[in-house]
């Protein structure tokens, strides 16, 4: 792997690793860390020679507009999940930071891998905590309530009726998804 792509991968991995450690330990992702990651990504996207991206074979920055579009796409994709309390605000900001580094073309693949990793984490946590029955009962109540709301012409509410005690460090899923997409692109990079 050429040096610029390797350095970008290491820098992004470092930011994501610190976010995962913080999320596992405190269930918080520091705003300062996310801001520093965004600024570093923006600087690279703007100051590097214009090309196909920080992880492409022809290394270079996407430019300010594409970096900001990646940031906005990250916010737009995870904000609805935050509004229904599936992910935290730190997770939304972390995905937006990843969007700066990846740009809008790589972000959808990273999001798909993130959601898959998050689903696997949720299944493992559910099975490990022996809360399968409660989770399935919650899903049944949520879907039934949503269907009734829709039939009555009200907005469907997806609030879980009984809280589960498990909160997943979703920064781990974001890191897996983001670095998985970077790895895929680097593995298949060709002139």
Image (cartoon, rainbow, N blue to C red):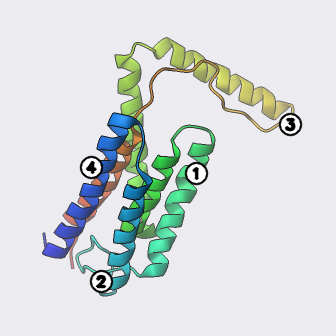
Q: Residue at x 58, y 51 (%)?
A: 79
Say which mark, if any, is on residue 79. 1
Q: Looking at the picture, how far across and down is residue 58, in whole percent?
A: 24, 81
Q: Residues within 10 Å of mark 2 (few under 14, many from 20)?
A: some
Q: Mark 3 — residue?
A: 153
Q: Of residues 171 and 40, which is closer to you in this image?
A: 40
Dot 3 or dot 1: first in sequence order is: 1
Q: CA distance from mark 3 to mark 1?
A: 24 Å
Find residue 143 and report its image quarter. top right
Q: Nearer the viewer, mark 3 or mark 4?
A: 4
Q: Quadrant of the N terminus?
A: bottom left
Q: Residues within 10 Å of mark 4 (few under 14, many from 20)?
A: some
Q: CA distance from mark 1 to mark 4?
A: 22 Å
Q: CA distance from mark 2 to mark 3?
A: 52 Å
Can residue 17 be spotted in the picture?
yes
Say which mark, if any, is on residue 48. 2
Q: Looking at the picture, how far across and down is residue 146, in whole percent?
A: 72, 30
Q: Mark 4 — residue?
A: 17
Q: Residue at x 86, y 31 (%)?
A: 152
Q: Residues within 10 Å of mark 1 (few under 14, many from 20)?
A: some
Say which mark, if any, is on residue 21. none
């Amino acid at each position: 792997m050429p040096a610029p792509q390797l350095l970008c991968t290491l820098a992004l991995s470092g930011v994501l690793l610190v976010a995962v450690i913080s999320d596992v330990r405190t269930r918080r992702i520091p705003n300062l860390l996310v801001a520093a990651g965004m600024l570093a990504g923006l600087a690279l996207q703007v100051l590097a020679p214009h090309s196909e991206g920080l992880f492409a074979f022809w290394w270079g920055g996407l430019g300010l507009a594409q970096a900001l579009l990646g940031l906005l796409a990250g916010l737009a994709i995870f904000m609805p999940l935050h509004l229904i309390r599936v992910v935290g605000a730190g997770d939304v900001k972390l995905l937006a930071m990843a969007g700066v580094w990846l740009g809008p073309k790589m972000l959808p693949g990273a999001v798909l891998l993130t959601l898959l990793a998050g689903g696997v984490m949720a299944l493992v946590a559910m099975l490990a905590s022996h809360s399968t029955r409660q989770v399935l009962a919650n899903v049944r109540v949520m879907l039934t309530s949503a269907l009734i709301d829709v039939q009555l012409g009200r907005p469907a509410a997806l609030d879980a009726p009984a809280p589960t005690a498990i909160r997943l460090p979703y920064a781990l899923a974001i890191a897996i998804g983001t670095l998985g997409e970077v790895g895929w692109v680097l593995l298949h990079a060709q002139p």
